Amino acid sequence: MPPQIVAISSLEWPESPSELPTAIVQRAGQSFLTYEAHARGWLKRPAAGAAAAASSSVASASASASTSASKVASAESGGKIKAAVDLFTLSEDELSDLSYYEVLGGVPIHSTPEQLKKYYRKACLRYHPDKTGRGEEDAVFLAVKAAFETLSDPAKKKSYDSTLDFDDSIPAGNESAAEFYKAYGPVFERNLRFDRRYDPSVAADSSSSQSAKSKGGSKKKKTKKKGGGGGNNNRNSNKDEDDAPPTLGDDSTPIDEVHAFYDYWTHFDSWRDFTLKASESTDHDVEMADSRDEKRWMSKEIDRKAKALKREEVARIALLVERSMAADPRLRREREREREEKKRLAEEKERQRIELERKEAEEKARKEKEEAERIAKEKQEKAASKARKDQEKKQLRKAKQLLWKLAVAAHGKATTAEDKVWSDIESMHGDVDVINDNLATAAILTVAASLGGADADGNVSKVKVEGLKELKRRSDEIKNDMAEEKKAAAEKREQERAAAAAKEAQAKA
C-alpha cells in the first residue's frame, strides 16, 4: 500500500516512543535470500535418519534452514525478531492492525503447513474460549481462527500475502551510470518475490509433498544400506540453483546475460493476487450477500477491480524494466556500438554505391567510346568500300571502252577477210558485248592487251589486228560455257519433273 500521511494532534501523541505503532518495511538482501530458500525448498529439516547418512555440509544447511525459518517474518519487517504479542493486551483496533502471521504468534511467512498448524495449536491453547472462558464471539479467538483459515488455504494465503506491505516504488529513470546498479538492483531483487516460481500456494503444496516423501523415504531407508539417498538431495538442490532467475549483474556482466535478464523481466509472470485488496476497496463481502444474484454481482465487481489492479501491477513492472533498460550503462554502450556499427555499415554501403556508380560510369564511357569507334570504323570501311567499288566500276567502264575502241580499230585496220574474222561489224560488236558482259576488268584488259592494249588507244599503228582472233576465241568459249550451263540446267529441270511425276504416280498407285 502507498504510504499515507496522518495528522496527529499533540494531545494524542504517545508519552513514550515504545508506544508508537510499528510498521512492516519490505527490505531486499537477506530477507529475499531467506524467502527464496524457503520457496524453493532448499532449507528443509532432514527426514528421520537422513542426517546420519548426509554429509556435514548437508547437516549444516539443515541447521541454517531451521534458524532462517524462524527469522523470515522478522527479516521482512526490518531484520528484527519480534516477540510474540499477548493478544489479550490489545484493543480491537490494535488487534486489527496486526498481520495474520503476528496473530498466530509470529509464524514465519513462508512456513510449511505443518509449521502453521503447530503455531495454530499453540495459539488455541492460549486463546481458545474453552481455555479463557471469554465465549465463542471473543474477538481474539475469532482473529486467530480467521488467520488460520486464511493462511491454511493456499489461494487465500496467496491473496493475503499480496496485500502485505510492500514497497512498490521504482527508480525515477534519470539515474547516472554510477548510481544505476545501487538504484535498480535492490528493486528487481525486491520484486522477484512475486515471481511465479515463488507462488506461496505452490510452495506450500511442494513443502507438503516433500514432507510426505521424506517421511516415506525414512521408512524405506531402514531396509537400505547405510549411506543411500544423501547424494540425490544434493543433486536436486543443484538443479534448483541452476534454475535460479538471472540477476542484474554488474558492469562486467556479458551482454548476452544482460539481454537474458531483461528478457526474463519482460516476460515476468507475477503470482500477486489482488482479489482481497479488490474486495476491500470495493467494500464487497460475498459471504454477506443476500442472494445468489447479489453474490454474483459482487464477485464480478471484485474480479473487475482485481484485474484492474493486476494491470497496474503489470504496467508498474513494465515501467521498471523500461526505465532500467534506458538507464543501463551496458545497454547504452551496446546501443552506441550498434549505432556506430550501423553508421559504419551505412558509410560502407555509400562507399560501395559510389564505387559502383564510378565503375558503371567508366564502363558506360568505355562502351560509348567503343561504339563511336565502331561506327566511325564502319563509316570509314563503307566509304572505302564505296570508293573501291566506284574505282572498280570506273576501271571496268574504261576497260570496256578500251576493248571497244581497239576492236573497232583492229577491224578497220584489217585488210583481208581472214584478218577481219567477222563478215560484218555487227557480229564483232556482239562478241565484244559477250566479253564485256561476262568477264571481269582484268580479263577484259587481257583481251584488250592482245589488240595492243592501252598504248594502242588513239594510235592505230600500234593496234594488233591478230588480236581479233583472240577476241573471237574468248567470245566463243564464253558462249559455249553459257550453252553448257543452260543445257545442264534444262537437264536438271527435266530430271526434277520426272522425279515429281514418278512420285505422284507412286502416290496414286
Image: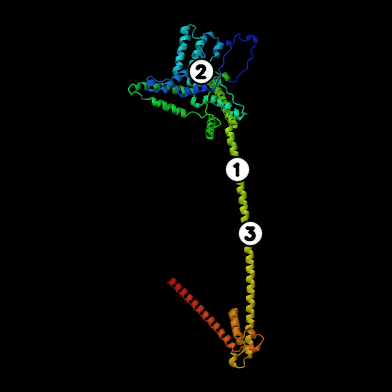
For marks 1 and 3, give the CA distance: 35 Å
Q: Residue at left 39%, top 27%?
A: 232
Instruction: Decide if residue 354 is on the left or right side of residue 54.
Output: right
105 is higher (above) or lower (below) than 187: above
In the picture, the disc for residue 344 is: 1
Return the x and y of residue 397 as percentages of the image width and height: 64, 79
Q: Amino acid at mark 3?
A: Glu
Return the x and y of residue 64 as percentages of the image width and height: 45, 20
For marks 1 and 2, give the CA distance: 56 Å
Mark 2 and mark 3 in contact? Answer it, CB < 8 Å.
no
Is residue 152 at least partly visible in the picture?
Answer: no
Q: Residue at left 63%, top 60%?
A: 369
Earlier in the chain: of badge 1 and badge 2, it is 2
Return the x and y of residue 29 as percentages of the image width and height: 53, 23
Secondary structure beneath dot 2 equals helix
**Structural crowding at the residue carrying mark 1, measured as other residues with C-alpha within 10 Å and reported as few (<14), some (14–19) or many (≥20):** few
Q: How many marks?
A: 3
Indicate the quadrant where residue 448 lies. Answer: bottom right
Image quarter hosting the C terminus: bottom left
Residue situated furthest bottom in the rendering: 416
Is residue 305 at least partly visible in the picture?
Answer: yes
Closer mark to the observer between disc 1 and disc 2: 1
Q: Which residue is mark 2?
A: 73
User: Which of the pair 405/133 is nearer the observer?
Assistant: 405
Return the x and y of residue 349 as percentages of the image width and height: 60, 46
Q: Amino acid at mark 2?
A: Ala
Image quarter hosting the N terminus: top right
Q: Amino acid at mark 1?
A: Arg
Residue situated furthest right in the rendering: 458
In the picture, the disc for residue 368 is: 3
